[in-house]
Image (cartoon, rainbow, N blue to C red):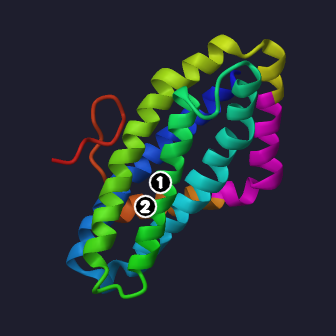
Amino acid sequence: MHPTQRLIEEHQTILRAMGVLERIAEAYGEDPGGTLDDARAMVEFLRGFAEELHHAKEEAFLFPAMEEAGHSRHAGPIGVMLMEHDDGRGLIAEMLNAFEDPAAGADTFEAAALSFAEMIRNHILKEDEILFPLAEETLSDHVRARLVERMAHHDEVLHGKEYQRQLAVLAELALEYPVARSTDGRPASPT
């Protein structure tokens, strides 16, 4: 197994979450008080799953391995991905700040959530189509095997129960805020 395979699988979970996030954002814009708990749960999912579980593996394991293989951290695909991770953190902070006054922050939350969903979809496309194939081409078998082990340890030993809890949170929110699926299994684009 290539280390990017697990990351690609997690991308599918994150894409599913983006559809749910958009539904929550729309509902929150209409009734902040009635959806505040769900909006908070979704933002916690984004922080827990996307940031602490997923992006942490890219930033702590994959990107440094690619650097060692000769790719620049400050330019090219890795630099773009790191910048977008930071942009995502900024949008998550905006969503969290909107909760301080739910009624007054409804428009802010909705705008930040919709921007985050659009940015993450584009980000995932770049990783899946550009960055990960580059990693597959340039990382040695030994480095790939080491990355698989380190990522598995990160998920199972350090975050095993939390990983499963985050997936359960998303499943519960997806039941409450169902998202239409496109023919390729990805959430259908909102129109």
Residue at horizontal 82%, vertical 33%? 149
Q: Is residue 110 magenta?
A: no
Residue closest to the eye, 150 or 78: 78
Relative horizontal placement of residue 142, taking residue 42 as reference (left or right): right
- Residue 130, which numbered label? none
Residue at horizontal 36%, vertical 51%? 117
Q: Residue 103: image x %, image y %?
A: 28, 86
Residue at horizontal 49%, vertical 71%? 41
Please name the amino acid that badge 1 sits on. Gly
Q: Which element type, helix, strand or loop, lies under badge 1?
A: helix
Q: Residue 140: image x %, image y %?
A: 77, 13
Residue at horizontal 56%, vertical 17%? 133
Residue denoted by label 1: 88
Please name the amino acid that badge 2 sits on. Leu
Q: Residue 63: image x %, image y %?
A: 68, 33
Q: CA distance from mark 1 to mark 2?
A: 5 Å
Q: Residues within 10 Å of mark 2 (few under 14, many from 20)?
A: many
Relative horizontal placement of residue 150, taking residue 173 as reference (left or right): right
For the stretch drawn in magenta, the main secondary structure is helix
Q: Tags 1 and 2 in contact by the CB under 8 Å rule? A: yes
Q: Is residue 79 above or below residue 17?
A: above
- The quadrant in which residue 106 appears is bottom left
- Residue 91, which numbered label? 2
Considering the image in quadrants, where does the N terminus appear? top right
Residue closest to the eye, 51 or 16: 51
Residue interval drawn in magenta: 147-164
Q: Is residue 39 above or below residue 84?
A: below
